[in-house]
Structure formats: structure tokens, C-alpha cells
Image: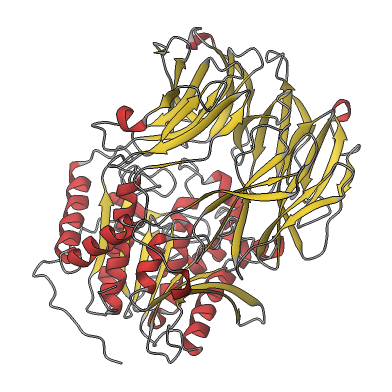
Amino acid sequence: MTLRTTPQPDIQAPRPLQKPHQHLSPSGNRDDPYHWLRDDSREDPEVRAHLEAENVYFEAHRAQFKDLEDTLYHEMLGRIEDDDSSPPSCWHGDWYYSVTHTGQAHAIEMRKRGSLDAPAEVLIDPNIRGEGLPFYEVGNWTVSSNGRYLAWAEDTVGRRQYTLRFRDLLKGEDLPYTIPDCGSSMAFASDGLTLLYVLNEPTTLRSYRVMRHVIGGRVDRDKVVYEECDESFYTDVQLSTSERFLMICLSSTVSDEVRVLPANNPRSRPKVIAPRCRDIHYEADHMGQCWVIRTDWRAPDGRLMAVPEWQIGSRDHWQTLLPAKRGLMLESFELFRDAIALEERINGTSRIRLLDWSLEELHRIDPQDEAGTLALDSNPDPTSQRLRYSYSSLVTPDQIREYDLATHTDTLLKSQILPSGYERAQYQALRLWAPARDGSQIPITLLSRANHPKDRTGALLVYGYGAYGYTIDPDFRVSALSLADRGVAFAILHIRGGEDLGRHWYDNGRMMNKVNSFHDFIDATDWLVQEGWAAPHRVCAEGGSAGGLLMGAVANLRPDLYRAMILQVPFLDCLSTMEDASLPLTTNEYDEWGNPEKPHHYRSIARWSPYDNLKAAPYPQMFATTGLHDSQVQYWEPVKWIAKLRDLKTDPYPALLHVDLTAGHGGPSGRYARLREIATDYAFALHCLQADSSS
């Protein structure tokens, strides 16, 4: 099939200068003439001029599909409720919920004291706080158990380097000081005045130091509670479900450690539940007089264990509470006074189980659809007899439901409404399995119109991630309907590197096994085409962050398989980044990608690093995005990659890059800006695939 072509804008792609630079390594030196595009200060006028030139070039090409983008945006906008609210949750007698209003980009956090009939009280209104700012995001917030003090973490740059702010809710006044350079986690002690929070390192942004602050006190007198010196660990603070303990949670790619101190004595020294041990993960929570622990110790897919609170300090006293079961992944748990709620995954599909404390099953919740997503929702009161959970699928709009342990009834609290209308019968969501080249079976979740042709004439957008053991669940996406309505099937490829099929699925897609992720993506795409879901060369691939690495690697391996690719904030210059311990995430991710100081790790990364493997070949039509203030993947990675790609590729298509000069890794802030970003991506995809532009 020959696709239609459209005239290209009469504008030359930016061509940055090449300046000599070598990366020196015992395993091999590498020339990198675009290294100068790295500007840590983000103030170099020459670099800034190049980024702005990239945006001018992008806008010139965007004009070709801007009308379609506008159509998609308004179409997607018509599927969301402008005025909306979440079901209220009760905590310490007060009701908490969020609301959104027409024309406002952010949800407002609200409270009603003592009763749902009480007057509504605004806790945080990001629309007011972020007014006039190019970026604003609340990373986290918490209220003291007595309901008086509010603490929240806000980011006005997009770099996830937060500033803590405080409000006296009784007086309705903000306190006249802030704490900068923080992570987003925090927890109040029992006195309602003492707050544990985490500081970030200023350069790497690694959360590493837990501090103790007393509301109203001087910040320069805050005391260090704990400092994590191992650069591969990140630090988080939480309050246990029982509210009797403050928890310091330390995590790396391959191990965890939890330290605890009494919430009624926040000046005490934290005690370790069990020391960290390589290749042993655990998380803990407290109820009654024991710690309940989810761990992969001698159980790769997880089991529940318990230890009396007076016998912590090692794993010697851990007792199995719920043994591991072959083929079942225990993903998380939540404790109630009368029950334990479990999030499990079996054969790639999520489910929820409720057990009593004698481990008898009280209830099991399975997906309503062939491939649906169940997850525990907000359950702040452990004495409640009601379990709140969420359900969604590619064809089922988001639901918030509540199961009553006493009456054994399941109630729908809220269902997502699409104001412009939605007829589920017009769509289908399927769980498919594609063979990988080594015999493994790759799960795929696919959305299409019910009448989508399987005669190799249609079009397809495939999405993947495949890293960190993160599972991309098939939830409802109003944007994907716009693809399906135009004859483009949308498929999530659950490749290795995620944990969809258990821990082995992750381990077989990281470190020395990383190429399995790329092969899985290629093999699953190829199978879908062979099965008739799309015509050859009518396939677009999409991935972000580590999924952008996936796109770059796949493009080097099989550029002929894809008509176009969308790379959102992509991780592309992997060798250079992993060689630089001063960058955020690097030291924490040696066990994800490899440490280039080790020759065999260097060779492994060099084998697939997208920037280092670009070659003279015809490539798909490319569209990459980045944020100038990205803290996870530095902006210069896609900037350098695009420049080198243009030097080498032999196809006639433009390679596009959009640099958001006001945002970071998560993209622009606010629901409307994010929806616009998706509309831009999908308009590019439809333009390249030449799918029907009408709905």
C-alpha cells in the first residue's frame, strides 16, 4: 500500500555545530560532537537558541496536522467532566475529597469537618497558588491527626525539587516560612506538631536525609533523624496504618530496608525491622501488635510474613502469614482492623482478595472484562468495614466501588461520565498473546472498534514501557477512543522488563537481559501485523521515559516495521548518563541498566544504547518531546539524539522535537495542558498513518 504524502514546509531542520568531545572509558572511548548541548545551568544562550530553533521547526511541521490536533483535543475534552468531584473519604471524623471546576486546570483539595453536612473548607487550591506560573504541581500533602495543621509539597519548575509549606487550618493562615529542596513525602507524629520530611541532594535530587521539624519552630534547628549514605537508595517517610509508628522506607532496585520509631516519641532513634540484603525486597505496615511484611525473600513473586513489634531487628523471627503460590504475584496489601486486603496478579490480570486475620477468604473481586484493572483505592480508616477500590478497562470507564464486609454488598460509588456520550458496544478490548522468538508468550491488551477489519488494511498504535518492574495496566483512556474511531487499533504490549507475569518477567528484561524487552516489542508488533490488525507500514509506536529508550532501541533494530514513532521524554544517551554519577537517578539505577565501570556492563549497554547505535538507514517518522527542567531524563538526551539522527538517516522524513521550556519529566501541569499534549501526539500519529481524520 502506498501512503499519501503531503508537501513539506519550506524550512531547514536545525543543524547544531559539531564540537570535538570524547567520553573516556577503560572499555572504549566515544566521540560525541553534540556533548556541548548539555547545559546544566540551562542558561547558555547558544544552547537556548538551538532549543528555540527546534521548536520553530516543529511548529512549522505541526501546522500540517494542527487542525486535526484541535479536533482531537476538543473531542477528548468533550469526554471529561469539567465539574467533578471524588467520593469523600473519612479520616479522624473529617471528610476529605477533591473537586474540579469548569475552566480550571487543577483539582482543589477540600474538607468537611465532622459531617458531610458541614461547610466545605478549601485545603489547597492549585489554581490560585499556580496563577501566573508556567508550571505548578502539588506533589503531596498531609494533615495532622488533630486536623489543625496542613503541610504540602509544591513544585513551580517541574524538576520535582519541592518546597514544603504549612497552614494553620484553625486560623486559616499560612505559616510565614517554607522548607526548600525537599522530596514530596512527609508524615506527622502523634502530637500533631512534629513533622518528618525528607531533603533532596541539590545536584542528584536523591532523597537522602530525614529531618524532624516542629510546626512554628525555626527550620535551621530541625534535627537529622536519619541519613542514607548509600547512593543507590532513595528515602521516603510514612505513617503506619495503625498510626503508632513513623516509618523511614529505604529502597533501591534490588533491596529495601524499613526503619521505624514510635509516633508518640518522634525524638527516639529509628530501629530497623530487618537490615537490607541484596536481592531481598520487603515493605511493612503495622496493625495491632505486629508488623505485616510483603517480601520476595525465598518467594520471588511475594508472600506475607509477620513479626511481633518487639521482635524486629532481623528476619529471624519472621513467620509466614500467607505463603507464596506458584503463578500468583502478590503486588501489595492493605491492613484493616478486621481484614487484610490483597492486590494480586495472576496470568497478567489483576484481582483483589479480602482475608480475615485467620487467613480465611472473605471475598474475591475479579475483573468484569477480559482484561481489566483492579486496584485498592483510598482507605484511610482501618476500623472501617468498607473496602474502597477502583476498576477500569480499555472499554469500561473508571469506577470507584465499595465492598461492605458486614453486609457482603458491593456498591458503585462513582462512575466516570463521558458528557459527549459513549456506547461501549461499539468497541472491543481483547487480551491477546504473541509468541516471542525464544518461545515466551507476550501479553497484549488491544482496543479497537468492534468492526475493526483484520484484513491487513487497518492501522495500529502500539505502546510499551518495559522497565523497573512497572506494569502498564489497561485502564480506560478517553484519548484512545479517538484512535479507534479513526480505524487505528490501540495496543499495550506487556513486554519483559515489566512485572506483568511475575518477577521473572522483570528480571528477564533488565541488565544483561535488556534486549529481551526490545525483541518482545518487535515480535509482538510483527505478530499483530501478521494477524491482520494493521497493514504493513501502518504502525506507529509510542513510549515515554524508559519507554522512549525502548522506542530508540527498536528503531535501530527494526526501523522498517514502523511508519512513525513517538518518544516522550526519552532516555536515549544511556552510556553517557550511566557513566555520570552526578546526574539524578544514575547511582540508583546501576542494577536496572548496568554500571559502565564494569566492562561486561559497559558492553551490554553499548549493545543497545539508542544514541550510540544510530546508523545510516531509513528510519520511521520521528517525534520526540522533552522538558527543559526534566529531572529524570535530562533534556539534552533527545536533543543530541535528534541531531545525530538527522546526520545519519537516509529517509526523506523530518525528525521532529518539541522542547517544553517550562516543564519537566511529567510534562505540562494541569489537565487541559496534558490533554493537549496527547492530542498533539495522536495528531502526529494519524497524520503519518494517513488514517481517517473524521471520527
Q: Nearer the viewer, residue 557 or 478?
A: 478
User: Image height check: is 178 above or below 463?
Assistant: above
Q: Nearer the viewer, residue 181 or 305?
A: 305
> Residue most toward the left?
10
- Image point 31% across, 55% down: which residue? 77
Q: Is residue 14 among what the camera can see?
A: no
Q: How many marks?
A: 0
Quarter of the image where one finds residue 65? bottom left
Q: What is the x, y in percent for residue 86?
A: 49, 40
- Locate residue 369 relative to residue 384 in the image: left or right: left
Q: Is residue 223 among what the camera can see?
A: yes
- Locate residue 326 relative to residue 504 in the image: left or right: right
Applied colour scheme: secondary structure
Q: Nearer the viewer, residue 119 or 693?
A: 119
Q: What is the x, y in percent for residue 159?
A: 39, 38
- Locate residue 351 relative to residue 518 in the image: left or right: right
Q: Split into 4 quadrants, where in the image is the N terminus?
A: bottom left
User: Image height check: is 361 above or below 163?
Assistant: below
